[in-house]
Amino acid sequence: MASFQIFNFSFIQIKQPVQANLFEPTPIYKMSEIWDKKQNILSDILHNETLQFHKGAKIYNHQLPFEQGEIYLFKIANNGKIKREINFTIQKEDHNPSCYVIIDNRHDCQNIAIQELKKSFSTPNQVANIIEQTLNDKLREYRLKVTINAKYSDKDFWVFANAHPLQIKEVRFHFLPPNIPDYTDALGPVLGISSKEMNGALTAQFNADEEDTLTFDENSPLQKKWTQLAGESGKPIEAKLIGSKKIHRIGANTLIMGEITDKALQANNENESNEAEYDAIVLFLNKHRRSNI
């Protein structure tokens, strides 16, 4: 079994005009024409044979062994050197350990699963940063960008709330931009906002009255929904206690992880049949859809 950390990605419109390049003229697109096609644009980028994953000036080699139905199974390698001793002489050789990345670009899904494999990258978040910069460099000409966020469970918050009854003075919940339909379907009834009304991340802050504290109940469906939606944002819930200026950031200790069989990761477009492997990948991805909230 291979262990994966679960991320989501969301699109943001760049309102400011893109600066022109004298040597490479930037096409002019109307946002009304491309917003509904944003996932198709991403698909074109992922299919482009000239795509190079990078962070700064460093290039990370990759392969795309399998893709089907807007699910992409990548292998991304970390380029480095390894020391070996041969005949009493230390030699350095190329060493390119890789990890798997699954990008789920199905309509309204927008999730990424990154293998946790320390021998290739120190953390999945390191790979997420590489993917984010690479995609944003390509999306820039469309006046789009993506943010990639590590999901976390709301369990930590309820442990914190139960450990500090009648002590929480202030709390801030952070949410994803409400432009992902399945997320907006859940967020809308909570905040009363539609996917077309905003173009940025949301924060909701609660402050207790001067001589009172905030009350939290894990059995409250509405409060449970708030904490789950905040967990999707990748930004910890923030809280302050009575008599303290310290901000407690809650959520980083309960990142969402999942496992997938090694056999499923052997899916390859060169094979005649990948039905069983594809079904296993889809089952794995569907467990972590926002619509499950």
Image (spheres, rainbow, N blue to C red):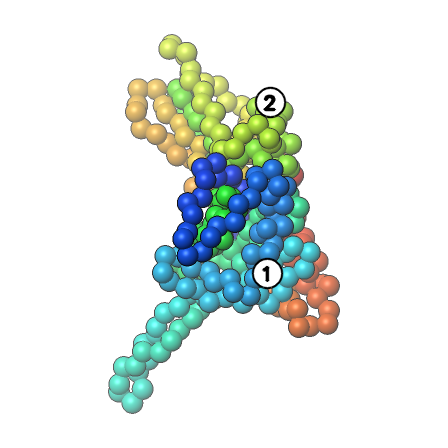
Q: Which residue is mark 2?
A: 192
- Comparing 65 with 251, the one in front is 65
Q: Percent from the top left, x then y, of residue 252? A: 43, 41
**Quadrant in the rendering for residue 83:** bottom left
At x 66% / y 73%, what residue is drawn? 270
Question: In front of the other: label 2 or label 1?
Answer: 1
- Comparing 9 with 235, the one in front is 9
Q: Which mark is residue 47?
A: 1
Instruction: Point out the image quarter for the N terminus.
Output: bottom right
At x 60% / y 67%, what residue is drawn? 65
Callout 1 amino acid: His
- Comparing 148 with 281, the one in front is 148
Is residue 254 visible in this depiction of the protein? no
**Quadrant in the rendering for residue 103:** bottom right
- The residue sitting at the top extreme is 211
- Marks 2/1: CA distance? 37 Å
Helix, strand or loop at mark 1: helix
